[in-house]
Image (cartoon, grey):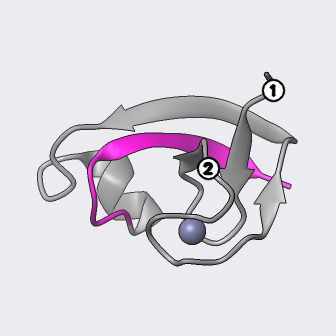
Amino acid sequence: MKKKVCRTCKCFVEGEICPLCKKASFSTTFQGHAFILDANKSEIGKRMGVEVKGEYAIKVR
Ligand SMILES: [Zn+2]
């Protein structure tokens, strides 16, 4: 199964709606990915505006 990424949060989603923003707008075109374990301590997390730990894509188109 192809991974998909929420266009709004950039998080990887397995279900039909994004658990973070409750939207169903996904992209399968993305670059890179990062595991954010502690959003408050992660530089990438801060830059991306991530507040919840998880797996995120760096760039989503
Ligand atoms: Zn989302």
Q: Residue furthest front?
A: 16
Secondary structure under badge 1? loop
- Closer to us: mark 2 or mark 1? 2
Q: Is residue 54 left or right of residue 26?
A: left
Identified by mark 1, the residue type is: Lys
Q: Quadrant of the N terminus?
A: top right
Name the foreground residue: 20 vs 56.
20
- Residue type at mark 2: give it: Gly
* Residue assigned mark 1: 2
Residue 3 placed where, x, y %? 73, 32
Residue position marked by numbered label 2 in the rendering: 15
Q: Residue at x 40, y 61 (%)?
A: 47
Q: Along the line of sight, which residue is nearer the eye, 17 or 51?
A: 17
**Image vertical order of residue 48 relative to residue 42, above or below:** below
Vertical side of 36 occupied by 47: above or below: below
Of helix, strand and loop, which one carries label 2? loop
The percent coordinates of residue 6 (x first, y second) are 66, 59
Residue 55 colored in magenta in the image: yes
Ligand 1 image position (quadrant): bottom right
Instruction: Give coordinates of residue 35: x percent, y percent.
Output: 37, 32
| The C terminus sits in image quarter | bottom right
1 sits to left or right of 56: right
Q: Is residue 19 above or below residue 34?
A: below
Residue at the top extreme? Answer: 1
